[in-house]
Image: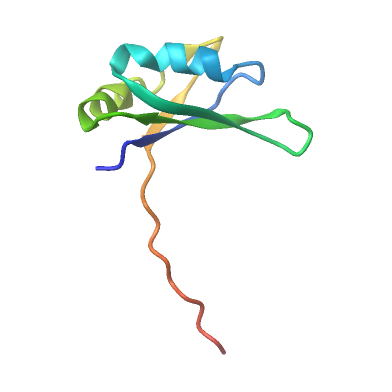
Amino acid sequence: MNLLIFIGNLNWGTTELTLGRHFEVYGDIKTVKIIEDHDGRSKGFGYVNFENKEAVAKALKADDSELEGRNVKVSIVKKREFKPRENK
């Protein structure tokens, strides 16, 4: 099981510290990252990487929970399989 979860629909002002505090109740966190545009503004989504799968399972139940006035979307990040392009 992947230990990385996607968090969407974040408030533009949400910080990585705030996001981490919202999810630390589910278990130990390795890293928190909010994705920003080239000007350093939040794109409204981020990732939380947990220490173990039990924490991930608990955190997934936070889907649609409220954080800074927004109902956040929580989902597991699926590993992508590399597929080479076909030459036509």
Q: Residue at x 47, y 76 (%)?
A: 84
Q: Nearer the viewer, residue 82 or 73?
A: 82
* x, y percent for residue 59: 31, 23
The answer to whether 26 appears left or right of 75 in the picture is left
* x, y percent for residue 52: 24, 30
Q: Nearer the viewer, residue 23 or 72?
A: 23
Image mark count = 0
Q: Nearer the viewer, residue 71 or 67?
A: 67
* x, y percent for residue 51: 29, 29
Give the position of the N terminus as an image quadrant: top left
Q: Residue at x 66, y 21 (%)?
A: 12
Question: What color scheme is it?
Answer: rainbow
Q: Residue at x 52, y 12 (%)?
A: 18
Say if 41 sits above or below 14 in the image. Answer: below
* x, y percent for residue 21: 44, 11
Residue 49 position by quadrant: top left
Residue at the outermost bottom position:
88
Residue 45 position by quadrant: top right
Give the position of the C terminus as an image quadrant: bottom right
